[in-house]
Image: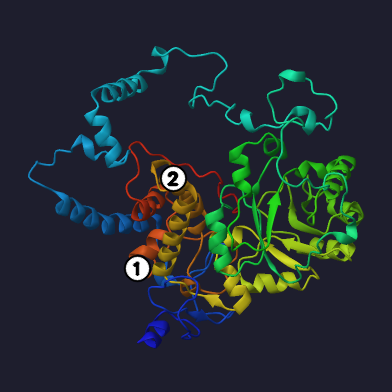
Amino acid sequence: SRLPRALRFGLSSVSRVAPSRFWGCACGEKRALGGGGEAGAGMEVPAGVAPIRAPYLTTKEEFHAYLEKEDNPRSNKGDTDGGGDDGGTKDVSSDLSEPPPKVQKLGEDGQEGNLREEAAEELKKPPGGRKRARGQNKNRPCMNPMHYEKHRLCPSIIQERAEKCFFGSQCRFLGPSTKTAGAITDEDIVKLRPCEKKKLDLQGKLYLAPLTTCGNLPFRRICKRFGADVTCGEMAVCTNLLQGQSSEWALLKRHHTEDLFGVQGGGCALMSRTNKFEQIVRGMNTVLDVPLTVKIRTGVQEKVNLAHKIIPNLWEWGASLVTLHGRSREQRYTKGADWEYIAECARLASPMPLFGNGDILSYEDANRAMQTDVSGIMIARGALIKPWIFTEIKEQRHWDISSNERLDLLKDFTSYGLEHWGSDTQGVEKTRKFLLEWLSFLCRYIPAGLMERLPQRINERPPYYMGRDYLETLMASQNVGDWIKISEMLLGPVPVNFTFLPKHKANSYK
């Protein structure tokens, strides 16, 4: 029964394989398509727009009308099933912004209930009616930044001036006078020689790029299941780490499945400050007992490449590996990555391994990248749009993943999120926030069975199209309201007055 369905959608080939070892698939199979060939005659599409088979193309108005039409019967059914004899009157205790036990407790305690009502009335007052304190951010509640003070190191230690503490005997920070228990090592006195450090061998491995906001622990677990070899945490600021901020240290936490894990810092502008760059690399290499890698762009300004001048020196400074993103900082993503320049820099970097990064969304893109003499590839946006890209590269095929399989993938992400951030109200909403950030990238994926030609290119804008079922169409929507609808399918209704604005805008299209 699978073959006629495949032929109906014009797939070049379909193969049955063993049940997925990555997650509980609804259909228990993976669909494989032949790569690169034309799938038949189709309608012309404008430049910069992904080509989709004509039967699936639609307009913006028809697209949203279909989603609204399909969603209304579901909403009406839910209202009918949940309705009682109260004439549609909503009970205050059913407010979903707080868990039912907490709402019930607040309702039983008259004093707390009054305080809550007073706070709500205070928030309803116009801004001019409230007293505005000078110097504070008026758009968000004031945060106390001193919660980490009790675990903060003495500034004299941070500045390597242990012989002189500016606070003297009144120092309340952790310092040399702190009593210790157990064995005392000499790691801070006797440094490891270069030959004693661990050797880094990542030849041919797939590297998940460090991703701000979306590169969280639950997402990295998803990518590891699909075949990512190396993962990296979100950007952490060393000053905040030395001050003991728990929120900053949380960025360094990794799952036990992340066997090759990196910690990321930041500073693209250092490429124009070579002396400062050298001091940082040499200094970090001196104090670290693990390999040090460097990730850079082609330069700071567009059309002014600097990487080829810096890369030959990184090996001498102490770097074990360098990753080059084929774009400048000012270029952003409207133009393609410069892989010819990456190939030139890869030859200059020898014997130091160099990883290439930029515009990889299929196994064909990965194969072309590996032909530029790089030691491996780093994948960023491609993993956000379709995290199963690691499987496609290793198995050298296109995966026409179904909407039910993608929904199971989102279910796993929410489970990992609740495990990582907690299952209370705050943990649920934090999981929802990062899920919505990820959905802002996932909606750019076009199912392989709908493409006029393969593969999908990362800088081609998806047109409006109808999926093969309602869920596939819903996942293709670029409307924030539809992303929220998907999150409600997994995490329940959103709180009252909930809004969401994605942090990263889709500026990869002209």
Q: Where is residue 198 in the image (x, y as percent from the top left)?
A: 81, 62
351, above or below 36, in the image: above
Q: Mark 2 points at which residue?
A: 427
Identify which residue is drawn at 55% across, 13% down.
134
Q: Is residue 13 above or below residue 23?
A: below
Mark 2 neighbour class, 10 Å CA radius: few under 14, some 14 to 19, many 20 or more: some
Mark 2 / mark 1, whichever is N-terminal: 2
For label 1, the residue is 469
Look at the picture and state if 464 lies above or below 147.
below
- Say which of 220 and 443 sits in front: 220
**Residue pictured at 57% horizontal, 16% vertical:** 135
Residue type at numbered disc 1: Asp
- Front-lying residue, 392 or 205: 205
Which quarter of the picture shows residue 77?
bottom left
Task: Spot the residue most to the left.
Answer: 85
Count the labels in the image.
Answer: 2
- Identify the secondary structure beneath mark 1: loop
Three-letter code, disc 2: Gly
Task: Give percent across and percent down for residue 500.
Answer: 44, 42
Q: Tell me if residue 349 can be seen.
A: yes
Image depth: mark 2 or mark 1 in front = 2
Q: Which secondary structure, mark 2?
A: helix
Judge whether residue 167 can be spotted in this image.
Answer: no
- Describe residue 348's horizontal placement relative to residue 412 as left or right: right
| Quadrant position of residue 9 | bottom left
What is the C-alpha distance between the residues marked 2 and 1?
32 Å
- Observer-nearest of 419 and 382: 419
